[in-house]
Amino acid sequence: MLDQPTPTIKEQRDLKQQDKERRRQAAARQGRTKTIITWSIVGLVVAGIIALIVLSGGGSSGAVAPVTDQDHVQGPRTAKAAVIEYSDFQCPACGAYYPIMKDLEQKYGDKLALVYRHYPLTQLHQYAELAAQSAEAANLQGKFWEMHDLLFERQDSWSKASNAKQTMIDYANELKLDVAKFTSDLDSTAVKDRVNRDVLSGNAVGISGTPTFFLNGAKLTNPGSADAFGKLIDAQLATK
């Protein structure tokens, strides 16, 4: 048997670095999965309470509202697969799903449409409605998705801010929006009505927690990873 050559010091360092990176990525995936599971359990505990609130407001289960020109959509509206997400910017579980949705967007490209609909859980998250209105105020200047990403990426920061409204204004300035217009739009009837439109459509299908996903109109049991989500999308694409 031939003796294996002894790795050089540089090769040993490279192997250690590669092993360290693999461990880091595995830990990150495990941490994301644990976060999703934890908040899913919390969601089940509060879902009954929220469902009672929704039902008392006249909501009922039905077909999810189809995607329209008024929806916020990443990807072509004619894509073979469409994921509608009812979400709350301050919801930790929604924050845990944010990188998963980014992974799906990158993986599927023009085969997938990702639709974001507001469903701020105001009974649980004090700044959820403000965040939704901030995204809509940014939308009036063509930067909904930029604000959407910023809100999720910095969820832990603005959720604990002493003056969350000022933080939103700071974000608008960072995104190079017209800050005076943003501030005026933030509390406008038009912006509030736009958020409420999504809430009402969520109530109509009996949304009781966030995030809630629909794939090509069918409500999903929330997948625990990007791979699990991808398998559901693949199955839909295979039927077309």
Image (cartoon, helix red, strand yellow):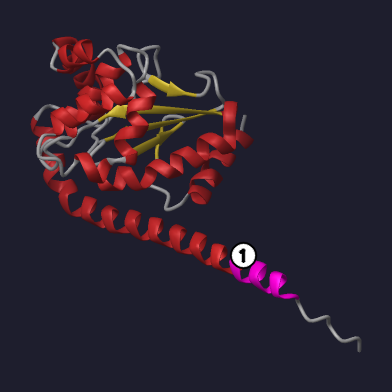
Horizontal side of 226 relative to 45 (left or right) equals right
User: How far across and how far down the image is residue 3, in percent?
Assistant: 87, 86
User: How far across and how far down the image is residue 6, in percent?
Assistant: 78, 81
Q: Which residue is mark 1?
A: 18
Q: Is residue 159 magenta?
A: no
Q: How many marks?
A: 1
Q: Main secondary structure of the magenta part?
A: helix
Residue drawn at 83 percent across, 80 percent down: 5
Does residue 120 appear in this view? Answer: yes
Horizontal side of 151 relative to 227 (left or right) equals left
The foreground one among 22 and 73 is 22
Q: For the residue marked with disc 1, what is the amino acid?
A: Gln
User: Which image quadrant for residue 99?
Assistant: top left
Magenta stretch bounds: 8-17
Q: Is residue 10 magenta?
A: yes
User: Which image quadrant for residue 207?
Assistant: top left
Mark 1 falls on what kind of element? helix
Q: Residue furthest right?
A: 1
Residue drawn at 29 percent across, 18 percent down: 138
Residue drawn at 23 percent across, 34 percent down: 206
Mark 1 Cα shell of 10 Å, populated few (<14), some (14-19), many (≥20): few
The foreground one among 159 and 11 is 11
User: Which image quadrant for residue 94?
Assistant: top left
The N terminus, quarter of image: bottom right
41 is higher (above) or lower (below) than 81: below
Q: Residue furthest bottom?
A: 1
User: How far across and how far down the image is residue 145, in percent?
Assistant: 38, 25
The C terminus, quarter of image: top right
User: How far across and how far down the image is residue 167, in percent?
Assistant: 19, 31
Does residue 199 appear in this view? Answer: no
